Image: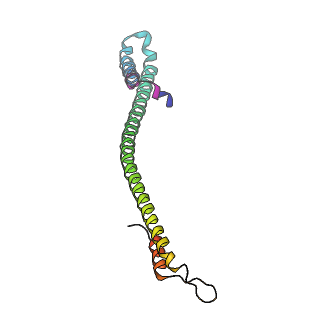
């Protein structure tokens, strides 16, 4: 059946109608064979052959109609996919700009927090608790927790 995709639709339609017309023509000619004495014995076989050709033509017409309806469905699906790809490209641009913006915000916040920690840590660098353990100031803990939060 995939070979049918290489033929133009008009050729397929013409072939199907030709088969159907041939069957009708042979069936009608079977009635006129009764008037010709030498063809009287062939009247019924010709009528049966005409009927079989008509049945084949109707079958081919149904197959052709199914093929065309599938081609139309494929064309509709391809159009929907093309629209979805266009929408996807637009959304991808939006997502990339959001990611870039958030990355810049995170970088900026991170640099600000590093500067803040560097500035605040020098105040407590010289203070040691008994036993050689360094005291961690509340401001440092707050700055660390602020850095761990998601950007808003």
Main SS class of the magenta portion in the image: helix
Q: Position of residue 84 (x, y in %)?
A: 38, 46
* Figure colour scheme: rainbow
Identified at 39% across, 14% down, the residue is 33
**99 relative to 84, above or below:** below
Q: Is residue 77 visible?
A: yes
Q: Position of residue 144 (x, y in %)?
A: 48, 74
Count of labels in the image: 0
Foreground of the two, 101 or 40: 101
Q: Is residue 1 visible?
A: no
Most extreme residue toward the front, as rendered?
126
Chain part drawn in magenta? 5-14
Q: Position of residue 6 (x, y in %)?
A: 46, 25
Q: Quadrant of residue 100?
A: bottom left
Q: Position of residue 86 (x, y in %)?
A: 36, 43
Q: Does the magenta-highlighted stretch encompass residue 57?
A: no
Identified at 38% across, 15% down, the residue is 34
Foreground of the two, 59 or 123: 123
**114 relative to 31, above or below:** below
């Amino acid at each position: 059946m995939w070979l049918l995709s290489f033929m133009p639709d008009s050729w397929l339609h013409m072939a199907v109608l030709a088969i159907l017309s041939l069957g009708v023509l042979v069936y009608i000619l079977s009635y006129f064979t009764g008037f010709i004495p030498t063809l009287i014995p062939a009247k019924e076989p010709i009528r049966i052959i005409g009927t079989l050709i008509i049945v084949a033509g109707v079958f081919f017409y149904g197959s052709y109609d199914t093929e065309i309806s599938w081609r139309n469905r494929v064309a509709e699906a391809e159009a929907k996919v093309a629209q979805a790809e266009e929408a996807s490209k637009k959304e991808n641009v939006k997502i990339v700009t959001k990611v870039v913006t958030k990355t810049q915000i995170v970088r900026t916040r991170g640099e600000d927090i590093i500067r803040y920690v560097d500035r605040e840590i020098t105040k407590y660098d010289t203070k040691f608790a008994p036993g050689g353990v360094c005291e961690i100031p509340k401001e440092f803990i707050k700055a660390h927790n602020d850095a761990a939060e998601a950007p808003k």
